[in-house]
Amino acid sequence: MATTTLAPTAPTYRTGLYAWLTTTDHKKIGVLYVVNSFLFFFIGGLLALGVRTELAAPGLQFLTDTQYNEFFTMHATFMIFLFIIPMLAGFSNYVVPLQIGAPDMAFPRINALSFWMLPLGGILLLLGFVTGGTAAAGWTSYAPLSEDRPLAATGYGQDLWIMALVLIGTSSILGAINFLVTIFKMRAPGMTLFRMPILVWTVVVTSVLVLMATPVITSVLIMLFIDRNYGGSFFQPPGGDPILYQNIFWFYSHPAVYVMILPAMGFISEILPVFSRKPLFGYKAFVFATAAIGALGFSVWAHHMFTTGAVYLPFFSIMTFLIAVPTGVKMFNWVFTMWRGQLMLKTPLLFALGFLTMFLIGGINGAFSASVPVDFALHDTYWVVAHLHYVLFGGSVFGVMAATYYWFPKMTGRMLNETVGKAQFVLMFIGFNATFFPMHQLGLLGMPRRIADYASNTGWQDLNIVATIGGFTIAASMVLFLWNVFLSLRSGPVAGDDPWEANTLEWATTSPPPAYNFDRLPEIRSERPLFDVRHGRTSVH
Amino acid sequence: MASSPRSSTTQTALFAIALAGAIVGVFLILAYLGVNLLDEGGRFVSSLYPPVAVTTQGAQIRDLYTIVFVLAVAIFLVVEGLIIWTVIRYRRKPGDDALPPQTHGNNIAEFLWTIIPTIIVIFLFIVSWQTLNAVDTASANVQTKIRAVAAQFQWQFDYLADDGNTVEYTQFLPTAEIGGGMYVPAGRTIQLQLVSKDVIHAFYVPQFLFKRDVVPGRTNVFDFTVNESDAGQTFRGQCAELCGTGHSIMLFDVVAKTGAEFDTWLADNIKKASAAPAPPSGQPAPSGQPAPSGQPAPSGQPAPSGQPAPSGQPQPSAGGGGGGGGQAVNIEAEGIKFNESSVTAPADQPFTIHFENKDQGTPHNVAIREGSPSGNQIFMGDIFPGVATRDYQVPALKAGQYAFVCDVHPNMTGTLTVQ
Amino acid sequence: MTTDEKALLPVEHNPLASMPHDTHGGTSNPVLGMILFITSEVMFFGGLFAAYFNLRANAPQWPPEEFAHTLKILPFVGPATILLIISSFTCQWAVWAIRRDDRTVFIRGMAVTVVLGIVFLLMQITDYAFLGQEGLTLASGQFGTTYYTLTGFHGAHVFGGVVMLSVILYRGMAGQFSGRHYDAVEGASLYWHFVDVVWILLFSLLYLLPGKG
């Protein structure tokens, strides 16, 4: 049988910018997602630098109270809805069809629609900056503050914020539908559910969470919009209930944090076996642990509301503690994947190790908050800011960096520079810890969240200065990253099909893959089809 | 990936050591910051610990924190240690060409690391639940009832009669720096009701290791008892739920007194409040106000309860009606802001401040301080809620720069030029 | 064009791209996609219902005094409900028809369904006008806010369904469906049934459930 090598330079009659704007190819769409997400990562990061600069010294130096509130509100909004969730969706979009041996996603045009809703949502959010002020009631937007009480959120910003989030949420839901149909209906022959790469499993659970939870935040945002603009009284006393807002809001926003971490855990679960030269330890346990996290994730939402006096505390406390168990199972499985392996200390593995060590801290400090009386002291202080950044930055961002270094060669055909990568890792690791570890102490000392300023006699300044220096260190590491990307795109070493000696199907085709992904597929007899080919256990059809 | 075996080993080893060193170094620095012992009379303190508790409930929470902390450190050391050791021990060395054993899993291991963490978290839940029941129960024997009313951006404290509803006295000044604060009797069970006039706030005192949200449309209640040994101290508090632009200045103090001192203080205030209904032209300031001694910042450590010497300044007063007169300075308060950022007044003669409070239901006043808002307070006008107008009779001032402020809202300031 | 040459074309213009792709049989991709979409819609209405139940439970009296009999004055609620239920039957009749390749009956059934859907919407709008005259608006406390939000979003979904079915009707009249190719019809009909079920729930809750206080 003749071997047709499908070169990526096959003639097309859409080229250049037009091709990118009208594409329905999951690989191009995946790249668009990743690039758009990095753009909003930088915007969110600049806002964070603004916050850190203002907090380095007592007194309001360059932001007003209102502007400060806008800065942290928009920082979180961009990071959650336009960086981390779409970034993970983008990598999944690129990798999942390849890993299951499919030619594309089930609904390619809806895939494109899902992407383009994101820059549109981003523009709506940014418009707030030039129309009298963005939303400024925190990304949680609690009512009644977010309902335009005097001295609070004014201007159109809050309404633009609501509209943007409804748009972005819809994009997520359509993406989830696409992933689930693709994964359940379009796997290559021989790929049973328990032979799917573990990343695909995490995308399944993530998509179920997105599908079930995101519509709930859509509903509460619409109710908020009605209260703000049509005289509604869902959340305003008398009769209306601010706690109702919190319950519905957190019913989504807690599962959302698993949406923000599970695919990153999937990335780590792909990288560790490759760089340890061993299979993932406990594949089935992993699958069940992921499913357990997804299911339990729906039962803990009110742990964000322990201090409201309106929550059945014991139930939410025990469920929150229990979620530590499947998470711990995963942690041990990852460590024992490396145990007795042969670790290749390249940049993807370094970032994966960063994930393991830092996410562990995030899980541990979360246990403090799960204990209700301790939470009475720690809630709404910088302790929580430390916790959320250890899981979201120490976890998800390090996961994203690992994924970038790992799949960049597949996406572009070139390797990212190892030395620059290692330097970026070290700088980012140090900067990250310098920024967020002191926040544990600040929270314990009593520094609340979301304050534009603090008095000089609180004694909080020294730790704040350390955190600010850390923040700028992270920024420096991202400059290194950008430099690495531009350098490598231009003159990085050519990657070839399989630069990492990897296990899964995306490495069984060219870098980048051709329009239909595969010329021929290997036999699939385990969760490591390419490994099997390489070691003579199966053949390519 | 060809390279000479020796340089590859050295390279990797050096890198691993450098990395491990960086990680350990980072943690040593942070641990140093963490065990920065504060001078607290011999009790174990560390900035990785909450403050020493001043309430009986807070002490129990701190003990629970110790249990969680010990487990957390143990788990951290074991698991991080395992990771670091694995990376160093099992890194690929030159000559490692054959695949390592392709272990797929181990069911016994899975069982163990499922069941042991489950036991640990159930233990943590149970001790937390026990502490919760101890600290968050409504006491049978409440001796003092107070209502904290939160609004954008102020706190006021209503001292209630035994029925838990009738207000005997309202403390409008939230911070001790200017003689205000929530005075409480140490050693007695205090019930605090939390009421909001507008958005969600939170009542947070770090030294209580406790906070509770203040939600409009609902009255949260909690009990606390300040340790008798902590009578005479003042504890800072702050709103801990984002409530708008003034969230960061919504400060208050809890001033702990002995039972007897508190009873006297309250009785005096009740008498003054009921004895003199507000006349049109000002009222002596609530009793117990020392002339403030120039604290550095509005939220700063309060003046100790022993009154500092007034240092020869005229006592705070709003003069009685009539006479004195002179030109009127017009000031309005609206939207928790003064309408004027600077006003002038004549030197060396008494003058009137015609003050219009346009904020419905919100207490304001005009007070004058020397030089800047952090200077000595030399005149204090009546605090009254809007919408209403008062004329304050200000005694003669020497020429110079002063600041006028609202004692209830530290962000409301302006400059007064006397010339 | 050989298969190899076709494989070189970009995804967007490749005739192979329109093939179902699914390798596992069973429920087709579009129908599975629609079922998942309906799941998300159920969760959306779930959020709205949760708010309704919560506010109603906290209210001392429901309906409040001034609106105690307001909903009873509506002339079209009953008839509209019956028409919507009938439209589900006509929709399913159309689906059965196309499954056995009876395109005439399929188009007839689909057309009747679309008309019934439009009539339902017109009846809703008229009822809204009556309620407005009685003084019930979005701004009429929790009762007004929840009533209009729930029925309004349901109406919006009916409208979306009418649009979807109209497209199906158009495509059917253009000959795009047959006994071997009707996934989109199945999907759209599932959505229409969902819209009907939500209405039955809403109708029971808002109009039939006894008040309190």
Image: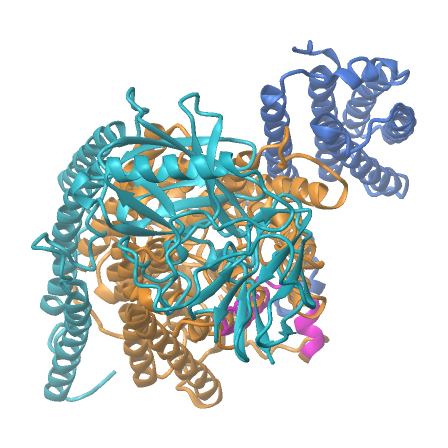
Chain colours: A orange, B cyan, C blue
- The picture places residue A454, in percent across and down from the top left corner, at 40, 65
Q: Say which of A289 and A62 sits in front.
A: A62
Q: Can the viewer see residue A288? A: no
**Quadrant housing the C terminus of chain B:** bottom right
Horizontal relation, residue B132 to residue A521: left or right: left
Horizontal relation, residue A512 to residue B119: left or right: right
Q: Residue furthest left?
A: B42
Q: Residue at x 31, y 63 (%)?
A: B309
Magenta span: predominant SS is: helix
Q: Say which of A171 and C113 sits in front.
A: A171
A31 part of magenta stretch: yes
Horizontal relation, residue B122 to residue A126: left or right: left
**Quadrant housing the N terminus of chain B:** bottom left
The residue range painted magenta reads A17-46
Q: Can the viewer see residue B197? A: yes
- The picture places residue C104, in percent across and down from the top left corner, at 90, 29
Q: Say which of A412 and B172 sits in front.
A: B172
The correct choice, above or below, for C35 with respect to B382 in the image is: above
The correct choice, above or below, for A86 with respect to A11 in the image is: above
Q: Residue at x 77, y 34 (%)?
A: C139
Horizontal relation, residue A539 to residue A275: left or right: right
- The picture places residue A357, in percent across and down from the top left corner, at 24, 61
Q: Residue furthest front?
A: B323
Q: How many discs mark residues in the rendered view?
A: 0
Q: Quadrant of residue C191?
A: top right
Q: Residue at x 52, y 50 (%)?
A: A140
Q: Quadrant of residue B94?
A: bottom left
A456 part of magenta stretch: no
The correct choice, above or below, for B159 with respect to B414 in the image is: above
Q: Residue at x 13, y 62 (%)?
A: B37
- The picture places residue A166, in percent across and down from the top left corner, at 65, 50
Q: Say which of A101 and A492 sits in front.
A: A492
